[in-house]
Image (cartoon, rainbow, N blue to C red):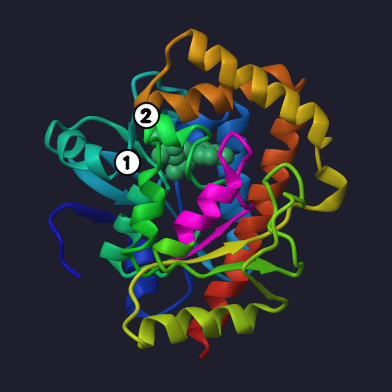
Amino acid sequence: MQNKYLDIHPEIEQALIDNKPIVALESTIISHGMPWPKNVETALAVEDAVRKSGAIPATIAIFNGKCKIGLSQKELEFFGQEKNVWKVSLRDMPFVISQKLPGATTVAATMRIASMAGIKVFATGGIGGVHRNAQQTMDISADLTEMSNTDVAVISAGVKSILDIGLTLEYLETKGIPVVTFGQDEFPSFYSSKSGFKSPLRLDDVHAIAQICKTKWELGLHGAVLISNPLPSDKEVDSEVIENIISNALSEADRKNIKGKEVTPFLLKYIAENSKGESLEANIALILSNASLAGKIATALYSI
Ligand code: PSU
Ligand code: MN
């Protein structure tokens, strides 16, 4: 698709023409989700994991008035180090693009840009969702509404318990988004393979996952299929420890009156800084595992 706002890397452009599997990757996790230099190391390792699983990685960000699909190492370094990078969800896209500001894209914005280019599969760490206490704050991530619109398979590790997992699952149901957990009955909660919630659906192989996506879209049911990939068991973080850190993070956010788009980055930073690196290690392991699963799903999707 020709679009004057898209700047697609030649390798990805060619892959689109040749109908090869591609996996979109977000950049908010690089600029606002992980500390330097682990963020860039991880971004490169994630691209590598996608390649090893047979697909082509397409990291997405906003730069110089365009949605860039496929970043060079130099550009990844820029988004990993530069302090004044916007966190861009859907509502920020017109502003950041027209002002030619650098922007790191969230799940919602990355999905939309991927879809504009014709990319069908997207891997991330954790998605945004319904925040705890959303009954008062109305803080519900645009990632969820975007997932009800845009035909992209989203591979994540479930949702972090900075969110209300039960309400997030309810909202996904309301929006008609199939939630499939890969290889187990329980919905995972990012740092843990458990959450206390049963996954709405379970599938154990990538071909079946590709089939559910294809069927959804051929039925004309627009929107994502959310695939939750439990993190590798040797990387799980003790849930009591993480719950304790999250509850301190939430109190601190409240005390500092953190609101709106700042909430999620604040909580993520607090957790990373207060868990002695354990959570960061889990975060890296799970995003690598998601990238690899996404590559396999993309490959399966292009073979049916
Ligand atoms: N949750 C995580 N890690 C992340 C994010 C969320 O565990 O990096 C990022 C993603 O880019 C996601 C965004 O799309 O935060 C959601 O932000 P908000 O809650 O403001 O919609
Ligand atoms: Mn929010």
Residue span colored magenta: 153-172
Specify the quadrant that holds the N terminus. bottom left
Task: Residue lying at the far bottom in this picture: please name it.
Answer: 304
Towards the viewer: 64 or 146:
146
User: Does the rendering let one see residue 272?
Assistant: no
Ligand 1 lies under 8 Å from the Cβ of mark 1: yes
User: On the rendered structure, is 69 left or right of 21?
Assistant: left
Residue 254 in percent (x, y) is at 50, 15
Which residue is denoted by mark 2 in the rendering?
A: 261
Residue 96 visible in the shown view: yes
Quarter of the figure with residue 118: bottom left
Q: Where 225 falls versus 43 (above or below)?
A: below
Q: Residues within 10 Å of mark 2 (few under 14, many from 20)?
A: few
- Secondary structure beneath dot 2 equals helix
Q: Name the residue at 56% across, 46% down.
A: 126
Left or right placement of residue 55 versus residue 287 in this view? left
Residue position marked by numbered label 1 in the rendering = 89
Q: Quadrant of ligand 2?
A: top left
**Measuring 62% from the left and 84% from the top, which residue is drawn there?**
207
The amino acid type found where label 1 is placed reads: Ser
Front tag of 1 and 2: 2
Q: Secondary structure at mark 1?
A: loop
